[in-house]
Image: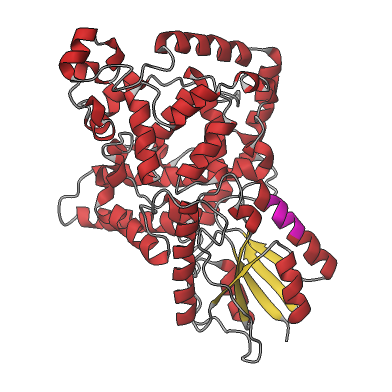
Amino acid sequence: MALQIVWFRRDLRTTDHAALATAAARGPCLCLFVYEPEQLQAPDFDPIHLEFLNQSLASLDRRLQQLGNRLVLKIGRLPDVFVELHREFGISAIYGHEETGNWLSYQRDRRVRAWARATGIPCREFPGNGVVRRLASRDDWSAIWKQRMRQPVIPEPATVPPPPPHIRIPSVSLRTWQQAGLSAPRISPPQTGGREAAVEYLHSFLHSRGLHYRSEMSSPLTAAESCSRISPCLSFGCLSVREAVHAGRQRLLQLRHEQHLTHVDPAWFQSLASFESRLAWHCHFIQKLEDEPTIEFRNVNPAFDGLRENEFRQDHFEAWQQAVTGYPMVDACMRSLRAGAWINFRMRAMLMSFAAYHLWLHWRQPALQLDRLFLDYEPGIHYCQCQMQSGVTGINAIRIYSPARQAADQDPRGDFIRQWGPELEGVPDEYLAEPHHMTRLQQDLFGCRIGRDYPVPVVQHETAFKTAQQRIFAARDSAIARLNARKVYEKHGSRIRTMEQRTRNEG
């Protein structure tokens, strides 16, 4: 009897899983996950990702066992693992979800599809979120996303029939970082992987933590608690985007009903609108990588090729990654990120902007560093944002963040900076964002000597800002950049009119 394979990748759940539901309805299934050495050794993979992945795999296996099956783990290159399974047991079909991942996963999926075609094995991939494969036009995307999100969540199968008892398929154990050939993890994941934790993160956000999401998402002081924190769950597929959308809408209906009975804080309605709009943006950015996989390592607008690549300063890069730039808000964010594997979106943008403009670093190396630091690393979102914040798309606004302005806006009392920069504890608020402006006498008085206790700024803000501004706008205003920008917009530009905008206009 040939095997039906349900191939799990970054869709580690049993609910809203079209591939599993389809295969389970048709008969016995081999539920399979493959550790791929080239992915484990990839420059964008970190031991923290492996630990979260293992937690998610263990959770998935527990649930599959409750449904009458189990998760089989293999290690190897694909399609080689499928070739061996087909040789030994026979494969009747492969079911999985479409994945928009890094370049390695893109090439792997092409190899698997080519092998399946050549072997005559059906390989059916289902959409797993709002990303559209072979999208004809960006004009159609928003409508497709909305239509997909309106569809009901696919229920978990009542049972997942296992292969017949005489078919014994060996499974490897969860891979340790040593077995994967990785360095020892710097930290443990600050969040737990797996379905149970994902559901709890979403529930606590929608029912308590998310009340002031819209007003508190920008500050690193409040964002860790007020943001949903489901991003790693979405990245590893412990939760689907559609589930999150439906849960948000159900909560909204509940609150509207409660309005008739008791007082409901109006902040809930604003925050839930913002939450859904960001779920749409989540898919919007991944769609860019789906449509153009080389965004991972090439400027989306080739007119900017060579703008920074040949001027890369390793000393600047090391100061940035080691959090010793001399700009407290930048260094505090990097230290927080290194310790907790998460920082809020605005601070991510500031970190990338500072690297790209103040330090004039080509985006690729900082992007790879952040890949490894973000527990919720999502290639489509990440690389598009890195290019946007570096100004190399030609269609997005140029934002050169001032670290001092961000400190004043998002950490006005200096609580975040002092938490992550204890050497600045005695510095008064008025100098905290730029302590190098203190006189020598003040430095001694407040116990923070610049160059000894805290670094001298790696660059001067005013000079770096003006130079970067001149260079990026000069490049952007060239005829070839403008011509390419029109092509970039046609292929990738947003046509979304978000729920948040509708709420604002109707409010």
- Outermost front residue: 452
Residue 397 in picture, x, y percent from top left: 51, 22
Residue 496 seen = no
Q: Is residue 133 left or right of residue 230?
A: right
Q: Quadrant of residue 207?
A: bottom left
Quadrant containing the C terminus in the rendered view: top left
Q: Is residue 405 magenta?
A: no
Q: Quadrant of residue 293?
A: top right
Q: Quadrant of residue 117?
A: bottom right
Residue 57 in picture, x, y percent from top left: 49, 67
Question: What's the image's color scheme?
Answer: secondary structure
Quadrant containing the N terminus in the rendered view: bottom right
Residue 363 in picture, x, y percent from top left: 57, 29
Q: Is residue 406 above or below residue 342?
A: above
Q: Is residue 110 magenta?
A: yes
Along the line of sight, which residue is nearer the eye, 129 or 371?
A: 371
Q: Is residue 468 left or right of residue 491?
A: left
Q: Is residue 309 left or right of residue 449?
A: right
Q: Tell me which residue sits at (45%, 81%) in the image.
A: 66
Q: Tell me which residue sits at (28%, 34%) in the image.
A: 420
**Dominant secondary structure (helix, strand or loop) of the stretch shown in magenta:** helix
Region of the chain picked out in magenta, as a range: 106-111
Q: Tell me which residue sits at (24%, 8%) in the image.
A: 440
Along the line of sight, which residue is nearer the eye, 177 or 405?
A: 177
Residue 306 seen = yes
Q: Tell me which residue sits at (33%, 17%) in the image.
A: 451
